[in-house]
Amino acid sequence: MSTSLSARTPDPRLFTPGPLNTSETVRAAANRDLGSRTAAARGLTRQLCEEIEAIAGLGPGFCAIPLQGSGTFALEAMLTSMLNGQDHLLLLENGVYSARMAEICRIHGIRHHVLKSAHTQGFDLATVAAWLQNQRSITHIAAVHFETGLGVRNDIAGLSTLAARHHCRLLLDCISSFGALPLQLAPGSLGALALSANKCLHGLPGLAFVVADEPALARRGQPRTLSLDLQAQWRGLRASQEWRFTPPLQTMCALAQALAEFLAQGGQPARYQRYAALAQALLHGMEQIGFKTLIAAPHRAPMILSFAPESRLPGGIAGFKAFLAQRGLEIYPCPHWSPDAFRIGLMGELCPQDIHTLLCACHDFISQRAPDLAAAHPHDASEHGSACHADNQP
């Protein structure tokens, strides 16, 4: 008889940008079979779209369009469907995910200009304003609300004011911010935003949405793709509440449960406060151990925090990551930025005890592998003490 994966190894604690640790009730909700062209499936689609629209809070005239796949699928659908051959896109690149949007535009031949800025801070609005003043052909601006490559929050409220002033429409990557960061927009500035089920909403991977302005969506250009054609998906859903191609029904069931829990726990304000409390404890503890944050406080948000040691990690980031993985703790490196930098995600079903466990493991690594660094931070030894070793045996 074969042994299930869950029986062989316990679930790790995922301090990653996603997928995330999910609740038992969310995972259990996916344990259901549905036919894709049934009344139950149609009702589930309608329910999810209405709940996503309500959380977005954009008012009438905006519709949520579901898509199979990760958040990148939604980004590609948004960019290829919301821009026609006459449009000119200004893309603000200050991280790996805005760079991914630029790659999508290049692949599809979308007319665009990339305005680059530092990856460790939000884009500079004065620079954007000057560029818009000199380039009157711009019709749309694309940006990322929260760049998870290093954990940088961009000023979307200020950008939306600029967009309205210059009669441009925003196309936003809200994949790692939707449901946690508030979104303040000038009237008439938003064209569409993309989001994913498996980030701040704590659902499962495989389901994404684009929330789009319906009049903007109705502008019909030549379709660039088949399966990512938002207009075609929107028309099909309006006509029958049925997807054009097989929907991820189990993931949809899980998201319905995740949204029920999200709302019961207090919605966006409560989720932000939950992450912020975890982030405060993590920042304090990592500083005591000898890790410095890469992103200054004005540019941070508590969903992802990036760190680097004060000196080189023995064995590099791969050795550090493997040490934590042996204790059931998963983090992601930042190979595009620094060989010893890493990210710690605070989304998902994490609690203060998980932060304590992670800090103890980091302390143990420094104590065992980098005694010089540990000696420079003697306070940490007394703060974490022997309890760390009791909590974190491999």
Image: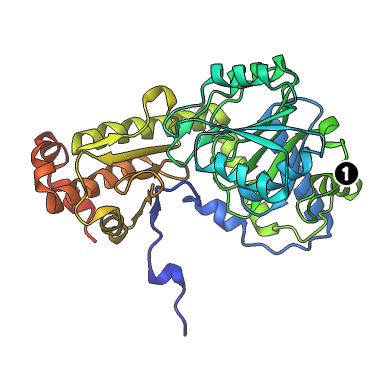
Q: Secondary structure at mark 1?
A: helix
Which x, y percent locates residue 94? 50, 34
In this rendered view, identify the residue nearer to me: 174 or 81. Answer: 81
Task: Choose top left, top right, bottom left or bottom right for residue 379.
Answer: top left
- Left or right? Give the position of 260 relative to 364: right
The three-letter code of the residue at mark 1 reads Arg
State how the image is colored. Answer: rainbow
Task: Choose top left, top right, bottom left or bottom right for residue 282.
Answer: top left
- Please determine whether, in this image, residue 87 is positioned above or below residue 9: above
Which x, y percent locates residue 147? 50, 37
Q: Residue furthest right?
A: 239
Which x, y percent locates residue 59? 76, 25
Task: Mark yes or no: residue 313 visible.
Answer: yes
In this rendered view, identify the residue nearer to me: 185 or 60. Answer: 185
Marks counted in the figure total 1
At a point 66% along the width and 62% down the height, the residue shown is: 32
- Left or right? Give the position of 390 relative to 238: left
Question: Within 10 angstroms of label 1, few (less than 14), some, or many (20 or more) residues?
Answer: few
At a point 61% along the width and 17% down the height, the residue shown is: 129
- Please determine whether, in this image, residue 299 is positioned above or below residue 225: above
Task: Mark yes or no: residue 208 visible.
Answer: no
In this rendered view, identify the residue nearer to me: 101 or 6. Answer: 101
- Left or right? Give the position of 26 relative to 323: right
Which residue carries the number 1 mark? 238
Q: Residue furthest top?
A: 165
Which x, y percent locates residue 340? 29, 47
Q: Residue furthest front?
A: 134
Quarter of the image where the C terminus is located: bottom left
